[in-house]
Amino acid sequence: MLPALGSRRMLERVQSALSHLPLVSGGGLEVRLAGGPSRPIDLALHATAAGGIMDLLARGQVTREAPLDDAAAAAWQRLRAFAEQHRAAGSLLREAVPQAWFEFDLDADDRLPPPNFFVRLDDPFSNPPILGPMALARQQAAHQLMRRALQPLGVEPSPKALEALALCLRHRPGSASVRFLGVMLARPGRGFRLALSDLPLSELTAYLRDIGWPGDHRPLVPLLYFIEQHVDRVALQLDITDDGVQARLGLELAFGRAREPRELPEAQWARLLEALQGLALCEPAKARAVQAWPGLVRKIDQPDQWPAGFSARQAWLRRSINHIKLTYEPTPDMPVPEGELGPSPLTYLVVHRIVTAKAYLAFNHPEA
């Protein structure tokens, strides 16, 4: 791993966590782009049902005797209950959930923290129709599936949360899909997270209004304009608790096509990172480290650093930049009228840490 991504201690924590976990398909590092090398690095691991992850979970064989505190042990028990339901004969979860992600908020503690758990939803549950005679029935089926997935994970949504979920499905723009459902097992609270892919920016503020988002759309406008100038693919993350949709938003930025003729992906990411530096959302050293990440790495070149959790056939990995995530977290006392935000509304959001940035750096086995 590249030293500029984080402190030596944080990189050691990543290595330690990987030594206790099987890499079934791949994963990634979530790196904060500002705040210096001492900032935490989060680890994500990707696994598929076809690759055996539900069998490993159900047998309690995922953590490789990692040191766990009581909270982490309880979280893995919930995941085991989910896997057992997934493996049951005729299970709807088996049909609808082909993949899962485990995300670890790493800190200085040597123990393996509880994972935040995300499942990828397959069609038709991720993409129920919004029009036509079958629209309501298909939306209800997706709603029922998500509720069923949450139960073994210890989340029993309140009536208000269930209504918020129904609104998110009912008002989803036609081109967007509810690709991921997640439970933040490592964080306090009883809520869950939805991730919608390929959301048109032109429909974002209307969608937020329709689902009962409690924020004001006006401070969002300069941020959305910045995003539209630099990327063409956006995924939206929404947190839902017993109080309904929360004000915090996650916006994952990526590229679907070149914005300039014959523009290479490297140039696209460089342009975006340069723009983030201009807003003080990214430090130059972090930008250089992110741009240096893509490529192929082989076990033979760095055997001492190769994680023990990788299988024998995983002797090389492909590294890539998956997305950059902007988190928008308005504060209750944030001024709303645009005239009060000063000469640059977007700069105000950055200075007051209402907007922060992370890079998601993927690593995948080419044959996975």
Image (cartoon, rainbow, N blue to C red):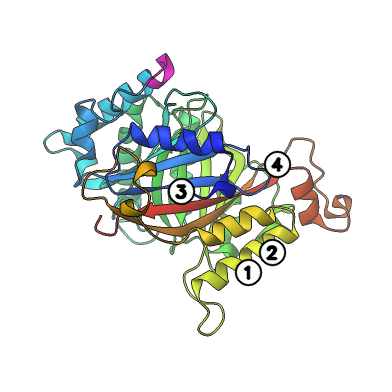
Residue annotated with mark 3: 195
At horizontal 66% and vertical 47% (from top left) the residue drawn is 356
Q: Earlier in the sequence, mark 2 or mark 4?
A: 2
At horizontal 69% and vertical 64% (from top left) the residue drawn is 275
Q: The magenta stretch spans which residues?
A: 67-72
Give the amino acid type for the residue marked by disc 1 in the picture. Answer: Arg
Q: Say few, some or many: other residues with alpha carbon within 10 Å of mark 2 (under 14 / 14 to 19 / 20 or more).
A: some
Name the image quarter holding the C terminus. Answer: bottom left
- Please tell me whether mark 1 sits on a helix, a strand or a loop: helix
Q: Is residue 204 visible?
A: yes
Residue 70 in the magenta stretch? The answer is yes
Residue annotated with mark 1: 271
User: Of the numbered discs in the image, which one, if any, rests on residue 330?
Assistant: 4
User: Of the numbered discs in the image, which one, if any, rests on residue 215?
Assistant: none
Q: Earlier in the sequence, mark 1 or mark 3?
A: 3
Give the amino acid type for the residue marked by disc 3 in the picture. Answer: Ala
Position in image of residue 190 (x %, y %): 48, 26
At horizontal 48% and vertical 53% (from top left) the residue drawn is 361
Give the amino acid type for the residue marked by disc 2 in the picture. Answer: Ala
Nearer to us: label 2 or label 3: 2
Residue 52 in the magenta stretch? The answer is no
Nearer to us: label 2 or label 4: 2
Proximity of marks 4 and 1: CB atoms separated by less than 8 Å: no
Q: Nearer the viewer, residue 299 or 345?
A: 299
